[in-house]
Amino acid sequence: MLRRIVQVCFLIIGGTLGIFLIPDLLTLLKLNDISIISNSYVTAIAGAIIFYLITFWAVDYVTDFIKWLEDSLVRIPVTDVIFGSVGLIVGLFVAFLIGYALSGLKVPVVNTVAPILLTLLFGYLGFQVGFKKRDEMLGLFTSRKKKSGEDEGEKAEGKSLKILDTSVIIDGRIADICQTGFLEGTIIIPQFVLEELQHIADSSDVLKRNRGRRGLDILNRIQKDLPIKVEMYEGDFDDIQEVDSKLVKLAKLMNGILVTNDFNLNKVCEFQNVSVLNINDLANAVKPVVLPGEEMNIQVIKEGKDHHQGVAYLDDGTMIVVEEGREYIGKRIDVLVTSVLQTSAGRMIFAKPKLLEKAL
């Protein structure tokens, strides 16, 4: 369909140029005695035929360029397009006003060259100002809405948007959290995150490839099997290279919440006042609270670092160090909690066999 449209455009351009240029060309070649020179229909048909023949060579290049331009425009966020277009319109309007004022000077060079230069200069400047100042203008509009009390619903809607980053998708626990209903609202999957997942899934490293494929499987599960709304964000930020920086900017733009497992990204979000949910913080928060003196039934699975120590683990991965537990390796025993230590790596529980307590 696009090829036909391009060919029709070439025919129209060729016919139009044929009417205006072919008579002058024949006159230049001293062939002005030919009777068809005065027939605009004949010259139009001749120009259309010439340009139609050109399409056999140029149509592929033109269609490829149009498709590339279309893909580039689709990737640009709608706010960038809107504010850039507004800036372009303002710039062209200013150029028109200045050119209209200069037209009264009656200077031939100024009247012909100045409007063209002003149009190019102010059009470019207007687009650049509108494109680069979009965040400030958007924030200005948002602050005005807050003052008038009209954006409360919009703010609540924005906070219901949960933007997933690559780490939390690969981790996989986000699907179980969505299934339990603890994560409400709409899940946003940015296109650049999906591209990063595909890149990881195509890696030559086996571990990376498996992690990437697991992430893609998790996305398919969230989209198809879970009762939660999932949307794709097709836009991109070409002026930003890092995916983490793109996620922070997208969270600001949507006024949404970023869901991650990345500790550094979490700190960046806090510094830039972006709402963030960390799955690791959630996992630590829901671990069972254990107090000294409580009884537990565990299975000692390996030897500890110190002499006669045994090591066991809870279902959530919490390590239990059992004093005098080396002789119970491979057995299930009852233990008494002696102390609980919270470290940067997680929670660690110290205990001793209950049988040893009875013996004492």
Image (cartoon, grey):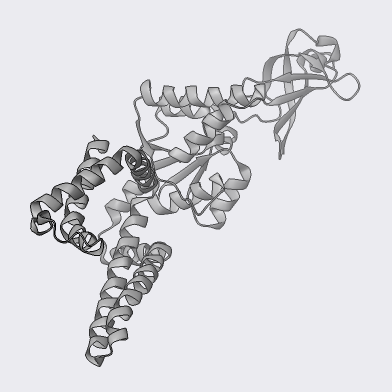
Count of labels shown?
0
Quarter where residue 325 is shown: top right
**Residue at point 23%, 83% (across, down):** 100
Q: With respect to residue 179, does 73 lie above or below?
A: below
Where residue 101 appears, x then y in whole percent?
Answer: 24, 87
Is 144 positioned to the left or the right of 40 in the image? right
Where residue 164 appears, x then y in whole percent?
Answer: 47, 38
Looking at the figure, which quarter contains the C terminus? top right
**Residue at point 42%, 34% (across, down):** 183
Q: Nearer the viewer, residue 299 or 254?
A: 254
**Residue at point 58%, 30% (across, down):** 200
Q: Nearer the viewer, residue 223 or 88?
A: 88
Q: Residue furthest bottom?
A: 105
Is 37 positioned to the left or the right of 166 in the image? left
Quarter where residue 178 is shown: top left
**Residue at point 68%, 20% (across, down):** 295
Where residue 289 appears, x then y in whole percent?
Answer: 61, 31
Is 104 positioned to the left or the right of 277 in the image? left
Q: With respect to residue 93, does 342 lie above or below?
A: above
Q: Residue furthest right?
A: 307
Q: Nearer the viewer, residue 165 or 89?
A: 89
